[in-house]
Amino acid sequence: MRVSINKRLMEFIDTHTHLYLSDFNSDRTKVIENAIAAGVNTMLLPNIDSNTIDQMMLLCEQYPKNCFPMIGLHPTSVKEDYMIHINLVRSTLKTHKFIAIGEVGIDLHWVKSFFDQQCEAFIAQLLMAREYSLPIVIHSRDSFHEIIEILKTNRTSTPYKGVFHSFSGNLEQANEAISLGFKIGINGVVTFKNAAISEVIKEIPLANLLLETDSPFLTPVPYRGKRNESSYLIYIASRIAGIKQISIEEVAMSTTNSAKSLFNLP
Ligand code: NI
């Protein structure tokens, strides 16, 4: 499959990409150039933990028009000492500008331990998102029910804003997330054969979808198995266009507008 795009007409936003990780140390500049050449002018960088903040901030300083940082503690980095990291998230929020709190949530796939700490870290970061009026980028892995319970218990009259990144649930769960104010983040998994997410995408309005690569992970077909990068976002957009029987231009326009408005981007 070759996807050719008219760059003048199409602009994409990769709403979730970890381009600051060491996987890109040898060719990061080239990877960013590839993305921009593919029309992916804007890349949103979710933080992982205290060890990734400096690298992420450096990349955003190098590409102030293209790369924008989030701040948060990833659930797989939550251990006994999670409060140290949470305090760093809080103090960094005071001194730097971020487009979102992320990525945060609960992961019961990779780590079944520290469940209580994961919940407490998630709730603390929900409160920070509220205090700073920032959207929330949620990582949910085998934990949809637990996350929804926390969101419902902690909600106020102001609806949530954010995204369920790398959404892998069913239609009912997608609708539940949307009803709480969240968008649905779609990545390379949609390009895999018989991807269950296709059925969900068919049923929910385009306006609720955001595009993401989650680079360097979850590489779409035709590069599955290799390192992922933000320029491959167009394969995800192309697949969504196929599923919804619309043009890739329409997918680009809708997802870019939704991302700009959710993350308050220039
Ligand atoms: Ni991620």
Image (cartoon, helix red, strand yellow):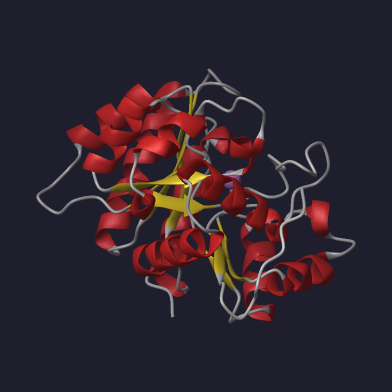
Q: Position of residue 266 (x, y in %)?
A: 44, 80
Side of 241 where 178 appears, left or right: left
Q: Image height check: is 257 above or below 214?
A: below
Give the residue at x 80% y 54%: 22
Q: Position of residue 238 (x, y in %)?
A: 60, 52
Of all residues shown, which one is farthest toward the right? 26
Which quadrant of the figure has residue 239? top right
Q: Image height check: is 64 above or below 93?
A: below
Q: Position of residue 165 (x, y in %)?
A: 48, 44
Q: Is residue 150 visible?
A: yes
Give the residue at x 37% y 31%: 119
Side of 182 where 4 appears, left or right: right
Ligand 1 is found in the corner quadrant, namely top right
Give the residue at x 61% y 81%: 8
Please state the total of marks drawn on the protein image: 0
Q: Is residue 165 visible?
A: no
Give the residue at x 43% y 74%: 265
Nearest the eye: 249 or 263: 249
Of all residues shown, which one is farthest toward the top? 112
Which quadrant of the figure has residue 242? top right
Of all residues shown, which one is farthest toward the left? 157
Q: Position of residue 107 (x, y in %)?
A: 51, 28
Nearest the eye: 249 or 222: 249
Nearest the eye: 132 or 139: 139
